[in-house]
Image (spheres, rainbow, N blue to C red):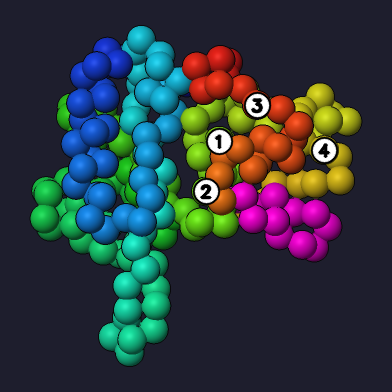
Amino acid sequence: MSEGKRFANKEAMTHALEIVGLLIPISSRIAIAGSLRRCKPDVGDIEIVCIPRIEPDLFGNPIMASGRISHDLEVEYGYELLKDGEHFKQFYVAPELKCDLFITTPEQWGVIFAIRTGSAEFSHKLVTPKKYGGYLPSYLNVKDGRVWNMAQAMSTPEEKDFFDLCGLWVEPKDRI
């Protein structure tokens, strides 16, 4: 849970939908996660998960347009990026209301979307093996946004794929 000022769901959702709308043209997939997705009445921040479109680089090689997202947020829309990593960007959408933007791939979407929907306690249980009180089968582990079965990375293109591996499904509003 974010510390500090809380914002009504409706106010934060308005800002979240604006950011999603700005990023749709350069995203192949984008969705609101976090406490907004869990329908909490008030939130401390906005969390969005995004897969950038694949675009050619100067030599015609396909690359994910993570840098284009930074450019558009800063130059086109005037947001000041507090953090500007390849997989994580953070900026204020209003005074004291931060947006955390998580950049992922199609193979990681299910894991990242589930973890970023939260809650923090629920997400921790998702990536903790059953033998330690979590939901993850003990022969699997989660590392770098992927589920691994020994040395084999598994694809989880949908959140349900990740939950199926854990043998459960919990609606976002019930993830506490």
For image coordinates 39% across by 84% down, the residue present is 61
Please identify, in this view, whether the residue under mark 2 or under mark 3 is nearer the observer: 3
Q: Secondary structure at mark 1?
A: helix
141 lies left or right of 116: right
Please identify, in this view, whether the residue under mark 4 or under mark 3 is nearer the observer: 3
Contact check, label 4 and label 3, Cβ < 8 Å: no
For image coordinates 32% across by 79% down, the residue present is 56
Numbered mark located on residue 19 in the image? none
Q: Which residues are magenta?
A: 145-156
Q: Secondary structure at mark 2?
A: helix
Q: Position of residue 58 (x, y in %)?
A: 28, 85
Tell me how far mark 2 sits from mark 3, CA to CA.
16 Å
Q: Provide the residue designation for mark 3.
A: 169
Numbered mark located on residue 109 in the image? 2
For image coordinates 26% across by 32% down, the residue present is 16
Q: Position of residue 90 (x, y in %)?
A: 33, 43
Badge 4 or badge 3: first in the primary sequence: 4
100 lies left or right of 11: right
Which corner quadrant of the image does residue 39 belong to? Answer: top left
Say what amino acid the circle numbered 4 marks. Pro
For image coordinates 39% across by 73% down, the residue present is 63
Q: Provide the residue designation for mark 1.
A: 114
Which corner quadrant of the image does residue 125 belong to? Answer: top right
Q: Secondary structure at mark 3?
A: loop
**Structural crowding at the residue carrying mark 2, measured as other residues with C-alpha within 10 Å and reported as few (<14), some (14–19) or many (≥20):** many
In the rendered image, residue 152 lying in the magenta stretch gets the answer yes
66 lies left or right of 15: right
Say what amino acid the circle numbered 1 marks. Ala
